Image (cartoon, rainbow, N blue to C red):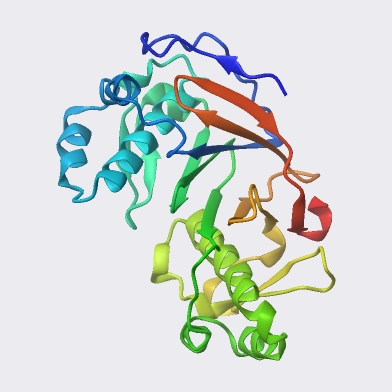
Amino acid sequence: MSTNVVDFASADRWETVVPLSPTEIHVWLAFYDERSEEPLQSAYRELLNAEERRQEPRFYFARDRRRYLVTRALVRTVLSRYVAIPPREWEFSSNAYGRPEIANTQGREACLVFNISHSHSLIVLGVTRHRALGVDVENLSGREVSIDLADRYFTAQEVAELKAAPAHQQQYRFFEYWTLKEAYIKARGMGLSLPLDKFSFRYPDKRTVEMAIDSEYAGDALGWKFWQFRPTPEYLVAICAEQVGVGSPELIVRQVIPMLSEKQCAPEVLRASQSAL
């Protein structure tokens, strides 16, 4: 698979436009431990605004500082692939629930929507147009959660199905539910003000996922599409996208080192809404 290498000494070299049709969702994967040399980190730092530069050293651990730096560079450089705004000049605001949104007039006029998630050493950035979008990633390796957490956050049906699963599958099933729920509330832009036990997921077969929503939250379960895939065995990614128009959106996945390289990849979709398969 070919890799396009970019001279990261120049922060403005983003001439290659990435086409993004209204029927596409682009997912960018950045494994931020892959490259950590100081010249590249310095190039990232040059892209940040004053507040972002002040925020970076507030993280106590060096790894967290690097994650923050790569995340900000990833968002700025990727968005500049879709709209002719230099990476340094992107501006952001937050909605009433704290979700980051594009503030530049030109970016808003392009109807760009993005969402970010990170876990361990992977950052996931989703980008689309004209539709709400939520992404979530969880690291599965060497991590265990108490299944009892499901009693607090899942519906009775999900709890019953989780506890009925074979013991060796319960951890993975927990994260299947969790990533889908996180992706959905991020797409809705409401955070945990939308309780996780007010909507549920079920698996009619090995590849399909369906959602039901409590009527008091006025959500149409048919108005959202879901995908899950594992870019590597250690990670599980969930995508939630608003259904707009007819047909189902197409996922296009790329792995990137910001300002250095990128390649398109095709991870197997493990589960999806019926019409998204």
At x 17%, y 35%, the residue is 51
Which residue is painted at 60% across and 15% down in the image? 4
Residue at horizontal 43%, vertical 53%? 120
Q: Tell me if 204 is positioned left or right of 249 in this view.
A: right
In the image: residue 25, left or right of residue 260:
right
Residue 141 in the image: x percent, y percent?
54, 62
Query: Is residue 261 shown to the viewer in this render?
Result: yes
Left or right: 264, with 75 as reference point: right
Residue 122, percent across and down?
Answer: 48, 46
Could you tell me how many numbered marks the image carries? 0
Image height check: is 26 above or below 40?
below
* 107 vs 172, nearest the viewer: 172
At horizontal 42% and vertical 21% (from top left) the residue drawn is: 106
- Would you say residue 82 is visible in this rendering? no
Q: Quick check: 251 above or below 42?
A: below
- Residue 94 screen position, x and y as percent: 32, 46
* Residue in the foreground of this view, choosing between 263 and 157: 263
Q: For this view, does 20 lie left or right of residue 101? A: right
Q: Is residue 163 above or below residue 235?
A: below
The quadrant in which the N terminus is found is top right
Q: Position of residue 152 (x, y in %)?
A: 46, 86
- Name above or below for residue 225 compared with residue 82: below
